[in-house]
Image (cartoon, rainbow, N blue to C red):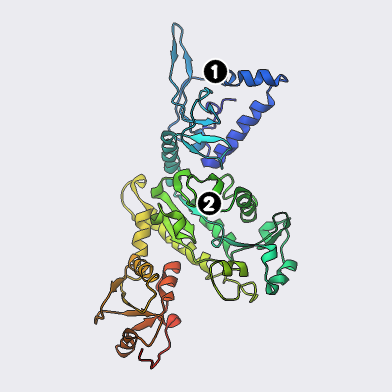
Amino acid sequence: MSVVTDSPVHSSGSDDFAAYLNEALDENSSSSSSDEEAEGKNEFEDVRNKRRKFESTEETEGSTSEGIVKHELVFAESSVKVDVCTHPGSFGDMCICCGQKLDEESGVTFGYIHKGLRLHDEEISRLRNTDMKKFLYSKKLYLVLDLDHTLLNTTILSHLSPEESHLRNETDSLEDVSQGSLFKLEHMNMMTKLRPFVRTFLKEASEMFEMYIYTMGDRPYALEMAKLLDPQGKYFNAKVISRDDGTQKHQKGLDIVFGQESAVLILDDTEHAWMNHKSNLILMERYHFFASSCRQFGFNCKSLAETKSDENEIDGALAKILEVLKQIHSTFFDKLEGDLVDRDVRQVLSSLRGEILSECVIIFSRINHDALPTLQRVAQKMGATCLTELDPTVTHVVATDAGTEKSRWAVREKKFLVHPRWIEAANYFWQKQPEENFGLKKTTNNS
């Protein structure tokens, strides 16, 4: 089987690309002769010979699995026409199009689709354009999902606190993971808790998005978590990216995602992991089910597991964000004007975010100098106006101390006096939060 010429005409994305490549390689393997040395010697010539059966064509519709430009040997009655292969990608040192042995490695590695697969920039661009048109006209965008603290929380078994030891006897069966949410993975010495509402979230999100997993965990861990979240392989299949697949150390990037950046949303709890794609990011409130997770981020409090509680299924973080995703999807497809391929989901994201605190005029009082710039930036992105001097137009004083001059002024002038967590909560839930839930206690302190 020729890796390119025999590729399916109507496949769907990197999942089908991976399945097709596996089939092609398996067929090559099963048809091998008993003489392994001869097979190795003639491998590249065999690929080229098989391709002579086909005429030169280039599909204009389809997806990534159709993906490599077809340069064939076309035989005419009186002459032979030879097209020069552009070598759009490779397996190891072999061109996936013509089978020629290549001297240099170039392009981007897509190891999560198939080990050893590399594609050149031009081919990646072509595949993205093809995939994007197909999914946009199916009213789908792309959604890249982080794992830890976003969709689930994992701890090492030995890191369970004494107050969490009861969990060892409360785990769900690995025989049918679709019915459970707490799993003990003995072979990995880990315990994983899925975030409440995650299964409903994935089901409904899959109707609007082509979804990827992208984690800073290693590949075995990523695949194990994917099995828990998607046991039937309906949502992710081959689209599971780990730190082993990334092109930048300690960073995540969209260069290995088959989606145009203008159509991609990212859901992650860590902003600095996406330094080049902040405009695509929806920041998630971290899910701390285990005590080790709380300690990791410096929280001196009991974990959800220790208090034998959990996030609310109905109005927890994932349920709230699902509503945001629905709003973004609806705005992109139903309210924007112009051709679909010219629309940009980042503009929708920015516009909706800018409405959250658009009627608020904020001044900060006695906020830690390290935290202040971030709070100001977040508030301004949500549409708030931030002042440095007291003004009658101020609607909110954000402080950690009710005894400061500005805090007392807020009380006298009947302005809202709120803790910085009010801004953080609005940012996570994409909605202005009730001020009374974040108020500061009044004090007579004159400091």
Task: Decide if residue 320 is on the left or right side of residue 332.
Answer: right
Q: Could you say where residue 272 lies in the image, as x and y percent from the top left? A: 44, 58
Farthest top residue? 78
Task: Decide if residue 283 is on the left or right side of residue 407.
Answer: right
Q: Could you say where residue 324 lies in the image, as x and y percent from the top left? A: 44, 63
Crowd tier of the residue under label 2, counting other residues whose Cα lies within 10 Å: few below 14, some 14–19, many 20 or above: many
Crowd tier of the residue under label 1, counting other residues whose Cα lies within 10 Å: few below 14, some 14–19, many 20 or above: few
Q: Could you say where residue 279 lies in the image, as x and y percent from the top left? A: 38, 56
Quadrant in the picture for the N terminus: top right
What amino acid is at disc 2? Answer: Tyr
Which SS class for mark 1? loop
Residue at numbered disc 2:
214
Task: Decide if residue 113 is on the left or right side of residue 405.
Answer: right
288 over 44 or under it: above or below: below
Quadrant in the picture for the C terminus: bottom left
425 over 108 or under it: above or below: below
Q: Could you say where residue 183 lies in the image, as x and y percent from the top left? A: 69, 61
Farthest right residue? 169
Which SS class for mark 2? strand
Q: Nearer the viewer, residue 338 or 353?
A: 353
Residue 187 image-quadrant placement: bottom right
Tag 1–tag 2 contact (CB < 8 Å) = no
Q: Residue at x 44, y 54 (%)?
A: 274
Q: How far is mark 1 from mark 2, CA to CA?
A: 40 Å
What amino acid is at disc 1? Answer: Lys
Q: Residue at x 42, y 46 (%)?
A: 136
Q: Which mark is residue 53?
A: 1
Q: Nearer the viewer, residue 378 or 341?
A: 378
Q: Which mark is residue 226?
A: none
Examine the rendering and report whether any part of residue 241 can be seen.
no
1 or 2: tag closer to the N-terminus: 1
